[in-house]
Image: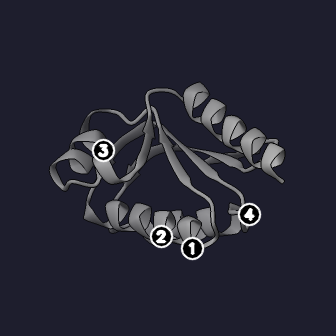
Amino acid sequence: MDSQQLITGMLISVVGEIDHTNMEEFESYISRELRPGEPLVLDLGGLTFMDSSGLNVLLLLSAATRNQGTCLHLAAVQDVPARVLQITGVWDAMNIHLSVEGAIATVLRDFAVQAQSS
């Protein structure tokens, strides 16, 4: 995993697999990088496999960011992880973007709208 600070929020690139053997490590890394009150973009373009443990972490992250008044954005979700999100019905409940650039553009647009209304 690799992280990058955005103008507002954090971009984390995830590669490999998320399953019961590494979900605690994944969750711990994300928790360390998460900035309270700022959006989180997960680049899942390099994620090749995800089981229910990984799905659970994504759901917990989504709830945590929502409780902080912000959002979790998933970007470039590929094959197996996309299928897991779709068959569980989670796909429609998440902020999913075709590309990382699209997710970041949404985060920046939302930030600009908030700044104008403040």
Mark 2 Cα-neighbour bin, 10 Å: few <14, some 14–19, many ≥20: some
Query: Residue 10: horizontal and vertical position, in percent?
Result: 70, 49
> What SS does tag 4 mark?
loop
On residue 67, the disc is 1
How far is mark 3 from mark 1, CA to CA?
A: 25 Å
Query: Residue 8: horizontal and vertical position, in percent?
Result: 78, 47
> What SS does tag 1 mark?
helix
Left or right: residue 87 compared with residue 72: left
How far is mark 3 from mark 4, CA to CA?
A: 25 Å
Residue located beneath label 3 in the image:
81
**Residue at the limit of the structure toward the left, as seen here:** 87
N-terminal label among 1 and 4: 4
Left or right: residue 4 compared with residue 25: right
Report the mark closest to the observer, 3 or 4: 4
Residue located beneath label 2 in the image:
63
Whether label 2 touches label 1, CB < 8 Å: yes
Whether label 3 touches label 1, CB < 8 Å: no
Left or right: residue 56 compared with residue 30: left
Residue located beneath label 4 in the image:
35
